[in-house]
Every structure is written in C-alpha cells, then in structure tokens.
Image (cartoon, helix red, strand yellow):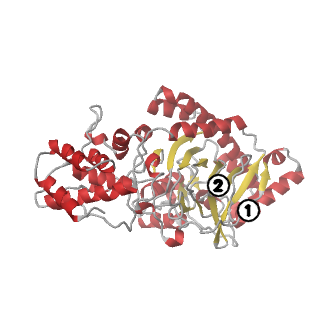
Amino acid sequence: MPSSPMIIVLNFLFFTSSSSIWPNIFNSLFSNVHQVAVSFFFWQPPSSVTPSQVSPSIIVRDRFKNFLVPPTLNTYIYIYIYIYTHINRERQMEHPLAIAKVRYSNLAMPSADHQFSPSPTKNETKDEQKSLVFDASFLQNQSHIPHEFIWPDHEKPCPEPPPMLHVPCVDLNGFLSADPLAVSTTTQLVRQACLEHGFFLVVNHGVDSQLLKAAHKSMDFFFDKPLQEKQRVQRKLGDHCGYASSFTNRFSSKLPWKETLSFRFCADDQQASNIVESYFLNAMGEDYREFGKVHQKYCEAMSSLSLRVMEILGISLGVGPIHFRDFFAGNDSIMRLNYYPPCQKPDLTLGTGPHCDPTSLTILHQDHVGGLEVYVNGKWHSIPPDPEAFVVNIGDTFMALSNGIYKSCLHRAIVNSQTPRKSLAFFLCPKMDKVVSPPKELVSSDYPRMFPDFRWSSLLEFTQKHYRADMKTLDAFVKWLSTEGILKIQQLN
C-alpha cells in the first residue's frame, strides 16, 4: 500500500495540469508496474475500434501484450481510482477513468475480501456496472478471482476427491446384434441406472475415433482465439445458441468458470442440410468452413447414436424400441462445446454449477482431464474420463416423457489450477412443437400423471429467459405455466 505522501502527490496531479502531461509526470515518478497502470488509463483504442467495441481484453492485449499483471498493480490502480473519483464526485466530470474503473474492476478482480474497494461513481451507468467480462486468457493466471465467481461454502468443491460413481457400461454393439441375452442384459443395466441416478456409459458405439479427435482438436482452434474473435458469434440474451463467456450477460453471482459455444442441429431432412456448417460459414467466414464440417458430421453421429439409445430406453420402460425413437426422429437438438480454463483458486468456484439438464438426453465426451461429478445418495461422486466411452444421462424432458419413472440427476463440473478441461455435449431435443406426454403404458394407478403436457419450446424458453436450471427446474416450470395462465392442455390435443 502506498504511503500518505504518495497520495498527496497523486492528489496534486489530479488537481493540476491537463491530461496531456499526466503520463510524463507519472513516468518520472514511478517505474515498472506504475507505468503500466498509468498506460492502462491513458490507453486510446486503435482507429478501427469504435468506443462501443472497447473491452477489457482489447485494452489488456494492446497495452500489456504478454505482460503478466502482478497483484501489486491492483492496489495502485484502485488508489488512483479512489482519489480521482472522490476529487471529481462533486464536479460530475466526464473522464475515461470512469470507464477504466468499471472495465478493469470487472476484469481484474480483487477478491471479495480485498482491502480496498472504492464505491462506484455517479457517472457509471447501469450497463457499465454489469459489464463483467470473462476473458479466460487473462483470468486463468490471476490469484484473485472476481467475487461473482465465488460460490457459497455449501456448494464449493469437495476438499477431498470424491468417490467414483459406479456407472454401468453399455455395449451398444451387443445390443445391436439382436442377441436376446445381450439385449436383456443391456436394457436391465440401463433401467437400473435410470431408476437410481440416470447416468450410464456407452461403449462400442460405432462413432469414428478420427471424428472424435477432429472434434476435440477443433475446440482448441476456437477457444484459443482472442475474445473479440469469439464474440463474433456472441450468444444473445434469451437465446440458446452462440458463444458465452460464463453467462456474464445473464447472471451476476455464482458464475461458472467456463466458456461455451452452442449451436443448433436439426435432423429434419428439410432443414438439416449442412445446418451446422452453414451457421459457422455465415457467421464466421471461410476460415470456419472446416470447423463447421467437422461438427456437422459430429452432430449427425450423435443424433444417430441418441436414437439407438432411445430404443434401449423404450425397451427398458416396456414401450418397445420404436415409440421414443419415432418421437425424436427429426430432432431439433443443441450441440455445446465446453471449455474450462485453469483457475488459480479452484476450491472457490465451479466450472458448471449443480443442475439437471432440462433437455431429453445428454451424450457427453470428455477429454483426459477429470471434472464431472454426480450427486447420488447425499454426496458427490466423480465420473472419470474414458476416451472410449460416451457418458449418457437423462434430462428433465425425458423424465417427463417417462412419467417420472426415470430420473434426471444433479451434476456439476469442477476445475483445476493446471490444465484446461474440454468436453463435447450433445443435447437431444424433440422438435419445437412436439407435445411432451408419456405413453399410456406408463400411466396407471401405481404411476399417475406426474407432469402436465407441454411443448418443448415452452420449457426451453423458461430455462433461457426465466429460470436458472437446477434440480427443481421441472417443478418450477409447471408452476410457472400455471401462474402465467398458459397451461392450455386443450390446445395441445
């Protein structure tokens, strides 16, 4: 912390001289880290960048280059901010520092218990106060993380590694062989898993290993890009597709330590023609043609695999292999690439918070870095990565389709301080106008209706605009339907 004489000197500088001579005075007084701090505040964007495009990442990359900002810098910058804002609070003066204060404090990060936290000025707009940006290339090296990423004590990662979850391994090739014993064994394994926790593994799935490698490699291609490049496909508020840097535009607390890229896949013949490839080609240009091709093929493989899994689920529930397969034919699904950068305080945050997937079925492929955890019997369990297997889990929509017989399960992802983690998640969804209703075979006096009929598009809207997915999403959704007066079952028939 600088001494009082230092503050006096700074105070003098603020009251005197034009801004044009400040850098010279500061450079003559300070060295190294102080010069960097000053250069940050007097940074001017390149002529090609409009004021609305200025972001912390642009400033940091342009000014700091490969310079790793030391923790000491935070103290001096905040003293600078504090003095300036208190001197000019009465004057209501406009100054780039007001913007710099918001931009830097949202990027850099003193922790919640930092010794110095200046009050916002009156000149800060509401939007500026919410302009938190998750720039992984910068934040992954910081010893202090923003308080928005710090989770409550009861939700923080386990201090000790959790036990592994016993997850049945389903041999898809055996099931497809039509051997009665293999089919019976497979369906029994799946039924037991879905009654207990909703997770199982699929091996011998027939997905090309080279396609898997290409899909994982393409994640490096995208997530290694500068923030501004990724933001060309920025996910809009209320939408479910696009790039999201920790959902900072939607939530203000318990933020996940991750970046995601989500996009639509449609298996409908009339809409499916290269939908993924076209999306990236139109949004990102020719450089992303191959990226789009890889994920077009990957989504097609996941769609085929998910329909096979639906056959198994149908048999295991006693409704036969066709019912659910036909329901999801022409599926309108979501593909998501997950990137979890290292975090220097992994014990304080989560890569993904505890939630149940609101979709029907999730098919996940993990890289070699562990991090997936499932909540079973009152405690967290890990599911270690297996490059030969897909992790499959039931979502809320399929729980409704099974009339609550099969359960969607609470799960989360943790991060570490050394190695980034990546995963590919395919979320199987029905067509938007499909009515989610269990087959009559699953409704009886022993199993009365658990949920009303609804359209998938309504649940998707609810989770994107009105509710943050957790273990009670489906119950909250039904209540929301009733409260909003849009539970119109007669229109669904």
Q: Evaluate whether residue 431 shows in this view.
A: yes
Residue at 26 percent across and 56 percent down: it is 126
Secondary structure, mark 2, is loop
**Mark 2 Cα-neighbour bin, 10 Å: few <14, some 14–19, many ≥20:** some
Q: Is residue 308 above or below residue 490?
A: above
Camera-near label (1 vs 2) is 2
Q: Secondary structure at mark 1?
A: helix
**The C terminus lies in which quarter of the figure?**
bottom right
Mark closer to the chain start, 1 or 2: 1
Residue ID for mark 2: 370
Is 391 located above or below residue 277 in the figure?
A: below
In this view, the residue in front, 35 or 182, is 35
Kind of residue at disc 2: Gly
Q: Residues within 10 Å of mark 1 (few under 14, many from 20)?
A: many
Q: Quadrant of residue 464?
A: bottom left
Q: Nearer the viewer, residue 337 or 279?
A: 337
Identify which residue, 9 or 457, lies in the foreground. 9
- Residue depicted at 64% across the width and 43% down the height: 329
Spatial CA distance of label 1 from label 2 is: 21 Å
Q: What is the three-letter code of the residue carrying label 1? A: Ala
Side (left or right) of 357 relative to 254: right
Q: Position of residue 63 (x, y in %)?
A: 33, 41
Question: Residue 194 is drawn in which quadrant?
Answer: bottom right
Answer whether labels 1 and 2 touch (C-beta < 8 Å). Answer: no
**Residue positioned 18% across, 49% down in the render:** 95
Please state the horizontal and vertical placement of residue 50, each as a whole percent of the image. Answer: 27, 37
Relative height, residue 62 to residue 393 (above, below): above
In the picture, the quarter occupied by the N terminus is bottom left
Q: Which residue is mark 1?
A: 193
